[in-house]
Image (cartoon, rainbow, N blue to C red):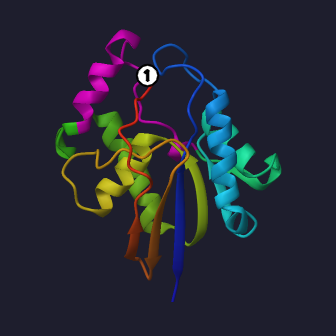
Amino acid sequence: MSQSHIILVRHGEASAGWSVHPDPGLSAQGREQAENSGKSLINELSYYQLLSSPKKRAIETMEIMNQGDTNSFKLDPRFIEIPSGNINADKKKEWLVNIFTTPIEELPEAVKKWRNELINWLKEVEGNFIVTTHFMVINALVSHITSNNAISYFHPDYASRTEIFIRNGELTQLILGDDKKTVINL
């Protein structure tokens, strides 16, 4: 019998908007959010495998949560934010709002590929993980788990944790992170 517990932690608040800076770090408030999240995960941090999106705000969130121990976590590009590299900065907000409600089968191919890589990881995962990642990564996974027809499902707050429990390949429990109508900095 295999059991997995996956904790997805949304990064803390970024210091700059998505369309202003391609890879901002955390704001002062984001650093505080990461610290508080780390305190709530203190028992799991030592025993779980730690992964982070390669984006600076996710890395900084993991570093702060893990009290600066950068050797004990790995960067995993599957957990990077939704691919939007070909979208003009001034159009990103409109594009993202549209993506929220687009049926899965109508998503752009790059987004479908990104989503499928996340889902494949979830189907194959064994063990316990804490992953610092992004709003849309969490939504893509929860949307899949709940069989939602759109990629968005809820609004996880900064540094909130969403927990997925799997036993023998089957979902046994899903605990959503703090659901806040967060402003996504563009």
Regarding mark 1 in the picture, which secondary structure is present there?
loop
4 vs 34, nearest the viewer: 34
- Main SS of the magenta part reads helix
154 vs 134, nearest the viewer: 154
Is-magenta flag for residue 97?
A: yes
Q: Which residue is mark 1?
A: 85
**Residue 66 position in % (x across, y down):** 75, 52
Q: Which residue is painted at 27% across and 62% down in the image?
A: 146
Compared with residue 176, is residue 79 higher up or lower down, i.e. above or below?
above
Compared with residue 58, is residue 91 higher up or lower down, i.e. above or below?
above
Which quadrant of the figure contains the C terminus?
top left
Dividing the picture into quarters, in which one does residue 24 lie? top right
Q: Is residue 174 left or right of residue 31?
A: left
Q: Which residue is painted at 76% across and 66% down in the image?
A: 46
183 vs 1, nearest the viewer: 183
**Residue 42 position in % (x across, y down):** 72, 62
Q: Which residues are magenta?
A: 77-100
